[in-house]
Amino acid sequence: MSTALGYRAFGAADVQEFFDRPDPVPGPAEVLVRVAAAGVNPLDHLLRSGHVPDLNGRLPFPQVIGMEAAGTVLAAGEDVTGLDVGDRVTGFALTGAGTYAETTLLLGESTARIPDALPWTWAATIPVAGTTTLDVLDQLDLPKGASLLVNGIGGGVGIALAQLARDRGLVVTGTGSTAKRPLAAKYGAAFIDYTTESVEGSFDAVVDTVGGQSLRDVAPLGKKLVAVGDASVTELGGEFVRRRLDRASLERVAELMAEGRLDPNITGTYPLARAHEALALVESRHAADKLVISI
């Protein structure tokens, strides 16, 4: 048996509860892991609230919260290759299986080994923020010296973009609230405080991590436009990020972290017993950068 944080019906935070469940049994293409750390993301509360029915609307309850984790392989399905019991890994969980848990199931093809020296908490941020950032930059394929506006530079994807875009020789400007200015400066990005300044200019590309009206405000500023959370970007002449979710992408991000070229900027680590606090902070949009659950 293992403890997990999940829900038995869609709704607000009051539907969340801790419960014990038997360790899941991996299917042919799945990996059972003992979770060491789990990343906290906006998608977690959107799934719990029932706002993404295409992903979890037909799955049985209870569902467990969380999509990304790092941990140790306990068992692997017969179709999984390249992973062995005892390996340190990071990966994407099956939707509904969750990662706010002591054990869970990861997708075999979306799970990768991590370097021994890489902290569990860092590895737990690779699947969502890390690989999304790689996908965006590969999709834009900008030359050195090109200008990039990151709308919402203070979140997990935004701050990873600041680092990896600069690593590729791009000139980065980010938007954010006043409190995000030191963080942008830390990673060499120019900064526009949207609470006191107009967001304007001309850029080779704009990446939006905010969505809604903020996306519409910045859409005209770039020759290229990619959004990571709001699919309506296509109505504005832009593209939604094309996600790969494969082992090779996970390995690339792990290598960048191990080489010191990417810092996930984790500002809060919570035990599993306080996972609901971490999710509430992300849901309130008052989270400072990346939060992780250490199990």
Image (spheres, rainbow, N blue to C red):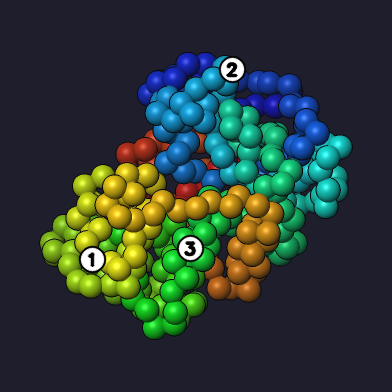
Separation of residues labelled 3 and 1 (CA atoms): 18 Å
Q: Which residue is mark 1?
A: 221
**As drawn, 269 above or below 79:** below
Find numbered disc 3 in the image and state the secondary structure of the residue it sits on. helix
Q: Quadrant of the N terminus?
A: top right
Mark 3 residue type: Gln
Residue 259 found in image quarter? bottom right
Q: Which residue is mark 3?
A: 139
Residue 253 found in image quarter? bottom right
Closer mark to the observer between disc 1 and disc 2:
1
The picture places residue 64, in percent across and down from the top left corner, at: 57, 27
Q: Residue at x 75, y 26 (%)?
A: 23
**As drawn, 2 above or below 83:** above
* Relative to 78, 90 lies left or right: left
| Along the line of sight, the residue nearer the viewer: 181 or 238 | 238
Give the label on residue 287, or none: none
- The reply to whether residue 83 is visible in this rendering is yes
Mark 2 residue type: Pro
- Give neighbour class at mark 3: few <14, some 14-19, many 20+ (Cα, 10 Å): some
Q: Which residue is mark 2?
A: 60
Q: Residue at x 55, y 73 (%)?
A: 261
Separation of residues labelled 2 and 3 (CA atoms): 35 Å
- The reply to whether residue 150 is visible in this rendering is no
- Nearer the N terminus, badge 2 or badge 3? 2
The picture places residue 13, in percent across and down from the top left corner, at: 40, 25
